[in-house]
Image (cartoon, helix red, strand yellow):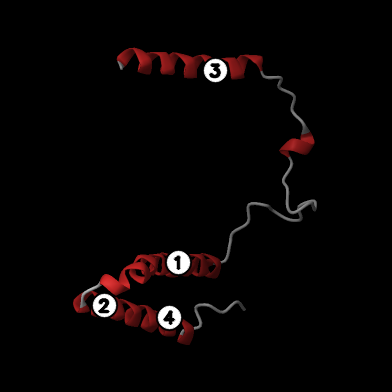
Amino acid sequence: MFKMALLALIIALALGAASFILVYRQRDSEKWSSYECGFNPWGDTRGRFEVRFFLVALLFLIFDLEIMFLFPWILAVSNMSIVAFITILIFLFILTIGFIFEWLNRALDWE
């Protein structure tokens, strides 16, 4: 086991060193330029994003993960006890209340 790990480490280091030694390095201005959908960049490409963008992305992740938890429930609903069924209904109720809260606070609107 130790010999195989040592051999794998030696091969990985040798290939990594070979890639640094044998590579042809030529600094190409086209390769190192900023790229924005085929257009030349206008303004600073490292500009700040609006906080609303991150809010919508975070809300998408939260709802996406919550929906992911519902797939196993859909497959196991026929073999489920009444306590488990009520627990999932409470989970869906909380999810719906959160969605209504975000909708009423206009968290999902782009202006």
Residue drawn at (79%, 51%) of the image: 38
Q: Amino acid at mark 3?
A: Leu
Image side of residue 3 versus residue 44, left or right: left
Image location of residue 80, percent across then percent down: 25, 72
Q: Position of residue 12 (x, y in %)?
A: 48, 19
* Number of other residues with Cα within 10 Å of mark 1, as a class: few under 14, some 14 to 19, many 20 or more: few
Where residue 66 sits, quadrant-wise, is bottom left
Q: Residues within 10 Å of mark 3 (few under 14, many from 20)?
A: few
In front: label 3 or label 2: 2
Name the residue that disc number 3 marks.
Answer: 15
Q: Between 100 and 11, which is closer to the camera in this rendering?
A: 11
**From this viewpoint, which residue is outermost toward the bottom?**
104
User: Mark 4 sits on what residue?
Assistant: 99
Q: Is residue 16 above or below residue 32?
A: above
How much space separates mark 4 and mark 3, taking CA atoms?
52 Å
Mark 1 or mark 4: whose residue is earlier in sequence:
1
Q: Which mark is residue 64?
A: 1
- Element under label 1? helix
Whether tag 3 and tag 2 are in contact, CB under 8 A, the answer is: no
x and y, in percent, of residue 102 in the image: 45, 80
